[in-house]
Amino acid sequence: MAERPALPFRVLQRSLRAASRAGSAVLDRVLRSSADPEPLANARPADSRQSAQGVSVRLEGAEGVREIRIQPGVTILEAARAADIELRSYCGGNCSCGTCRVEIVEGAKNLSKMEGMEEFALSSEHREKGRLACQAQILGAVRVRIPDFF
């Protein structure tokens, strides 16, 4: 019986780190959602009187342009849903399909750091301006273009 070649240690180490980061991101989301069951409760049009609160998000897509204000920490996918913009996510926001890829037009520095599975899911050509909407948390003003892939 032939022996299977063993995976190099560095491959195993990288895989475990990516899995650990993905697991901690899920845990953070669960803890955040249990602490704040309505993270989008304050989502409202950007021109509202209380526009001093929250973060401005401009979403551009086939359905037009919408600008809303949300609480920091909300993902682009959640913001799109709050703005009634269709953004496909076949895996339900679990970072396993890549269909929620968006283009960041302005404010890339105002998004959470790209980690683990998101880096893996995006090709090198899409990492420069693209993000997965289910993973990118909005921390400051951002302008996002939602492509019409399908």
Image: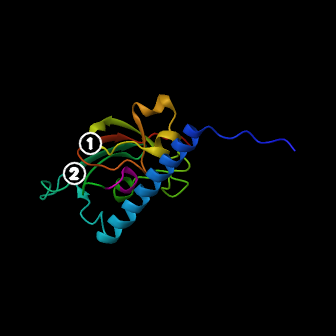
122 with respect to 65 (left or right): right
134 on left or right of 99: left
For label 2, the crowd category at 10 Å Cα-Cα, with few meaning under 14, some 14 to 19 and many 20 or more, is many
Residue positioned 51% across, 58% down in the render: 92
Q: From which residue to which does the magenta span run?
A: 74-78
Residue at the farthest right position: 1
Question: What residue type is disc 1 on?
Answer: Asn
Which sits in the foreground, 14 or 34? 14
Residue 9: give x, y in percent of width and height.
Answer: 58, 40
Helix, strand or loop at label 1? It is helix
Q: Locate the N terminus by quadrant.
A: top right
| Label 2: element kind | strand
Magenta stretch: dominant SS? helix
Which one is in front, 50 or 128?
Answer: 128
Specify whether 40 is left or right of 52: right
> In the image, is residue 143 above or below residue 24?
above
Q: Amino acid at mark 2?
A: Val
Residue 91 image position (x, y, % from top left)? 55, 55
Residue 84, magenta (yes or no): no
Q: Residue furthest top?
A: 125
Which mark is in front, 2 or 1? 1
Q: Residue at x 40, y 43 (%)?
A: 61
Q: Position of residue 31 (x, y in %)?
A: 35, 66
Q: Earlier in the sequence, mark 2 or mark 1?
A: 2
Q: CA distance from mark 2 to mark 1?
A: 10 Å
Q: Which residue is mark 2?
A: 55
Query: Does residue 139 appear left or right of residue 26 in this picture?
Result: left
Cβ–Cβ below 8 Å for labels 2 and 1?
yes
Please give the name of the residue rendered at 38% of the width and 61% of the height, measured from the top-left corner: 29
Q: Is residue 76 magenta?
A: yes
Category of crowding for the residue at label 1, using alpha-carbon neighbours closer than 10 angstroms: few (below 14), some (14–19), many (at least 20): some
Give the labeled residue for mark 1. 110
